[in-house]
Image (cartoon, grey):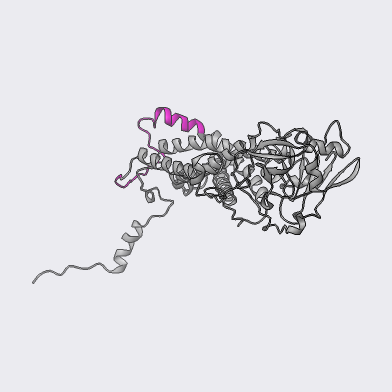
Amino acid sequence: MPERRRIPSLPDRLPDRLTALRTPADPGFWRSPVRGARFTAVLGLVLLAGLTLLFVTGLLSYAAYNPDLDPVNDKTPDKGWLGFYLFAWPTGPHWLYRLTQGLHVTVGIVLVPVLLAKLWSVIPRLFALPPARSVGHALERISLLLLVGGALFEFLTGLLNIQLDYLFPGSFYTLHFYGAWVFLAGFVAHVALKLPQAVRVLRSGIPRGEPDPLAAPDPLPATLSRRGALAMVGAGSLLLLVTSVGRSFDGPLRRIALLTPRGGTEQGPGPNAFQVNKTAAAVRIAPADTGERWRLTVRGPAGELRFSRAELLAMEQHSAALPIACVEGWSTSDQVWRGVRLSDLAALAGYPDSPPDVFVESLQRSGSFRKAALRDNQVRDGRSLLALEVNGAPLSPDHGYPARIIVPAAPGVLNTKWVETLTFGEL
């Protein structure tokens, strides 16, 4: 009679099953053969260069608003000593803000695959136990928390702003500004702790006899080499570059800038056929507001002066070829604007020799930047205009008819549309 084999009961099998279960804190849980110190070091050095450029261009973007000039320009109240870097934003070269903000947004988009790959490569370390083995290790973990949290927050809010999806609570300017300083604290600490190690790994590799601290102890069979993984990351960044950079620069790439609302769209024929941010309808500018009854009010030591559009057109007209560049990263090519110099209007207001700052108010009654301040160096520049025409035609309603501000190198929101009042004087 054949011997009966005993089938293990559930209680007998349970200990084996439990021992087979692994948690993220167990190094054996992570089995990708791609992870390794050299792979992470390459990604880290790319991020070091890219994130440094992002932070510098971000500070330049904030400075371009001249936030210490007037409270209406400053969307980050109580910034205190964090505003130490501010300076009077120049008016030349005229494409300066187009370049710096275009770089800021484009590099941010391109770095997304690199950032995600870097976080994936080190994620086992985030679950390592114990959380802190020493004071130095505790400081490293804290810096890592600031770095990862700050980077994800900055990238997320920046990408949402580009896509015009304002899902975050509060002002984008305030959140992005303070988030950048939190990120910087973690970034500087992490670079100080890890840069020497990354450079050593790239130069000499892992010393013979020492284990790779990021490699899986029990890796699965390789289906992709580490060089192949880096190539995939690079291909992802290249794809994002090709499908986004065109909304910041001229040429055929503008037509395939499909990942941004301000790119890849045709504006139609005619002199006013170039990008706009806010339309007249969106801010409830009615034809009656800009019709025959409209008057420009100019204030200064000479009193309060009022001009119709016809009277402004009768003044000496000047032209300037300038782009519009937005904080969202999109920009136009140079458009030929024509109108009255701000310095000439300052002379009429009572400042014939040294034009001062100017406070600009729009017909727009709600929303951000319906009021803005410009520095005296911006008013003095001969290319700074109260524009009445563009590319040989009157402004369209969406481009600010009956009159708008155009200033070289200024962020688009400071080029106020539907201007109603100019108040000249020290701000």
Most foreground residue, 311 or 289: 311
Q: Position of residue 385 (x, y in %)?
A: 74, 39
Q: Which residue lies most toward the bottom here?
A: 1
Which secondary structure dominates the residues rendered in magenta?
loop
Along the viewing direction, whichever of 32 and 47 lies nearer the viewer: 47
Q: Is residue 300 left or right of residue 130?
A: right
* Furthest-left residue in this view: 1
Q: Quadrant of the N terminus?
A: bottom left
Give me the residue at 38% from left, 55% from top: 22
Q: Quadrant of residue 6?
A: bottom left
Relative horizontal placement of residue 88, taking residue 227 as reference (left or right): right
Span shown in magenta:
195-222
Q: Is residue 189 visible?
A: no
Residue 421 screen position, x and y as percent:
81, 48
Q: Residue at x 67, y 50 (%)?
A: 396
Vertically, is 136 above or below 156?
A: above
The stretch drawn in magenta includes residue 206? yes
Give whichever of 31, 174 is nearer the camera.
174
Decide if residue 74 is on the left or right side of residue 101. right
Q: Quadrant of the C terminus?
A: top right
